[in-house]
Image: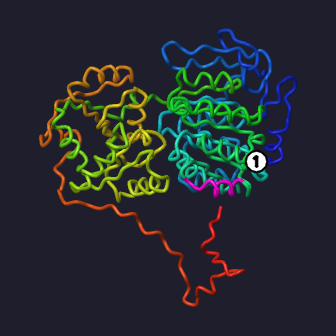
């Protein structure tokens, strides 16, 4: 790729336009409905920007773009990406683009704003990540001034995005920084001071670093919102809009989510300019490789049925409503002989990271969690999700279920429902667009085992110990004195950003 041409995308001004990078043709969308010119509370991006009202059905009504979208790509080699990225894709075993990648990348690589919907596991991370990295390639960030930003709602999703993009960023010599709560803010500030081209962040921690003077967003030319609807639902909207108001007003914005409903409308109207819109995957309720089961249980028998499901062969995620309930069930499962671990917002980030690692490597077979695990967690070959406590919102159901049947794999979502919950659950499933098989079950019976693999636990208590940290290897001739640098400080103990 011609690096000069790539870098010019950020400085070239379009004739008759607003200076949006890498665009051609008319710059303003013509939304249906009325609205005022420009934006209130945000940087002005020209006149003729009318507003669109959200669909009454709840699903976001996409804008009518003026500029036609480029056709989907059939192969990564067809895309205008650096050769280093293509090599890295081959090295990572990524051969054929997923539908959302094929649809969005030709447009986002050309600098277009994008509004993309794809269910969890559909490849959204590379859909925005490859465009972000390719368009940042060849540039160098000044201290505290990143060039690209990815905003996500949870720490787990931030780490997953960082892990997914790291090999591709490394191939382009781009530096990534992960900015999340629950970790050392000093170390994160150090990474920003050292210069990071791309920052993956949760809104709260990024705001803290900006308030401390450790980060500025005025050089951010590409901004991504991942799982944007969840950030709206979780109350992040004021922080998100405050951050978006600080990035370059002529920059590129990409908004990706598993659902696009009316909560996202504010962000689209205010910050996206003439976006290409792609909705390439069905919702989790329409995935053909996913089975949905509603199991009617007696309240007195629910605890035992849950224990037997947890004792199955294979991994399972179990969702409950509260942190206390998660901790209580985890303690009971461990005493019953089930290798379980708890994941919720009351755990420190190192604890949460360690728990996820143990679940992914099979050291733990049951992850007991609140909705903190409903998004941003990818575990291969996870074939069962159990709603021990039924969700109260259709989107929560879909995102809990989205942990299984990912990327073409099969899986089942099981919800345990007591008699007083049946009516509410029927309404929720209808709202989620899910058709489930309903079965009356009891602990110890064959029907529960057939559907979930339930079996009696061993009854032998287990203890899940944290793995011991790896110690640095020493040569036979090394000594404490020999490992010290100038001034007598032990260099091996100095953290690196």
Query: Above or below — where is 61 with respect to 19?
Result: above
Q: Position of residue 174 (x, y in %)?
A: 70, 54
Q: Position of residue 355 (x, y in %)?
A: 41, 55
User: Residue, x 70% and y 12% (percent of image)?
Assistant: 35
Q: Secondary structure at mark 1?
A: loop
Q: Position of residue 451 (x, y in %)?
A: 22, 38
Image quadrant assignment for residue 244: top right
User: Residue, x 57% and y 40% (percent of image)?
Assistant: 152
Direction from residue 274 to residue 460 in the image, left or right: left
What span is colored magenta in the figure?
A: 183-192
Residue 51 lies in the magenta stretch: no
Count all numbered tags in the image, as a single digit. 1
Q: Foreground: 467 or 52? A: 467
Image quadrant assignment for residue 320: top left
Write down the residue under mark 1.
145
Q: Quadrant of the C terminus?
A: bottom right
Residue 184 lies in the magenta stretch: yes
Q: Position of residue 59 (x, y in %)?
A: 51, 20
User: Residue, x 16% and y 38% (percent of image)?
Assistant: 301
């Amino acid at each position: 790729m011609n690096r000069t041409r790539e870098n010019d995308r950020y400085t070239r001004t379009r004739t008759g336009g607003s200076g949006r990078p890498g665009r051609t043709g008319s710059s303003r969308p013509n939304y249906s409905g009325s609205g005022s010119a420009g934006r209130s509370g945000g940087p002005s991006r020209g006149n003729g920007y009318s507003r669109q009202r959200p669909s009454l059905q709840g699903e976001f009504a996409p804008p009518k773009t003026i500029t036609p979208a480029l056709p989907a790509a059939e192969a990564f080699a067809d895309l205008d990406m650096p050769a280093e990225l293509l090599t890295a894709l081959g090295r990572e075993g990524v051969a054929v683009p997923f539908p959302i990648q094929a649809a969005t990348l030709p447009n986002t690589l050309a600098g277009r704003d994008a509004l993309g919907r794809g269910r969890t596991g559909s490849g959204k991370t590379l859909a925005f990540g490859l465009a972000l990295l390719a368009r940042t390639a060849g540039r160098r960030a000044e201290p505290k001034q990143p060039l690209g930003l990815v905003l996500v709602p949870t720490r787990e999703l931030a780490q997953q995005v960082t892990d997914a993009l790291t090999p591709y960023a490394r191939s382009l010599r781009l530096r990534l920084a992960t900015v999340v709560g629950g970790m050392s803010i000093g170390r994160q500030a150090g990474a920003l001071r050292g210069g990071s081209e791309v920052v993956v962040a949760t809104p709260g921690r990024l705001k803290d670093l900006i308030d401390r003077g450790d980060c500025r967003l005025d050089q951010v030319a590409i901004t991504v919102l991942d799982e944007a609807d969840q950030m709206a639902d979780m109350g992040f909207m004021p922080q998100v809009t405050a951050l978006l108001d600080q990035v370059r007003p002529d920059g590129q914005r990409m908004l990706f989510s598993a659902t696009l409903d009316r909560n996202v409308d504010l962000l689209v109207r205010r910050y996206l300019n003439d976006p290409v819109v792609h909705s390439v995957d069905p919702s989790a309720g329409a995935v053909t490789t996913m089975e949905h089961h509603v199991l009617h249980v007696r309240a007195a028998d629910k605890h035992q049925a849950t224990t037997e499901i947890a004792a199955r062969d294979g991994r399972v995620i179990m969702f409950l409503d509260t942190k206390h309930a998660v901790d209580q069930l985890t303690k009971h499962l461990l005493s019953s002989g089930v290798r379980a671990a708890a994941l919720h917002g009351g755990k420190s980030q190192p604890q949460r990271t360690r728990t996820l690692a143990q679940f992914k490597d099979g050291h733990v077979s049951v992850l007991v969690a609140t909705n903190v695990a409903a998004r941003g967690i990818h575990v291969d070959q996870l074939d069962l999700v159990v709603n021990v406590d039924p969700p109260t919102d259709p989107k929560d159901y879909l995102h809990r279920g989205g942990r299984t049947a990912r990327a073409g794999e099969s899986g089942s979502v099981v919800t345990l429902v007591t008699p007083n919950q049946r009516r509410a659950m029927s309404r929720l499933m209808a709202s989620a667009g899910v058709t489930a098989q309903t079965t009356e079950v009891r602990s110890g019976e064959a029907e529960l085992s057939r559907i979930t693999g339930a079996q009696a636990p061993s009854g032998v208590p287990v203890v899940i110990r944290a793995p011991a940290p790896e110690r640095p290897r020493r040569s036979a001739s090394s000594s404490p004195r020999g490992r010290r640098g100038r001034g007598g400080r032990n260099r091996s103990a100095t953290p690196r950003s």
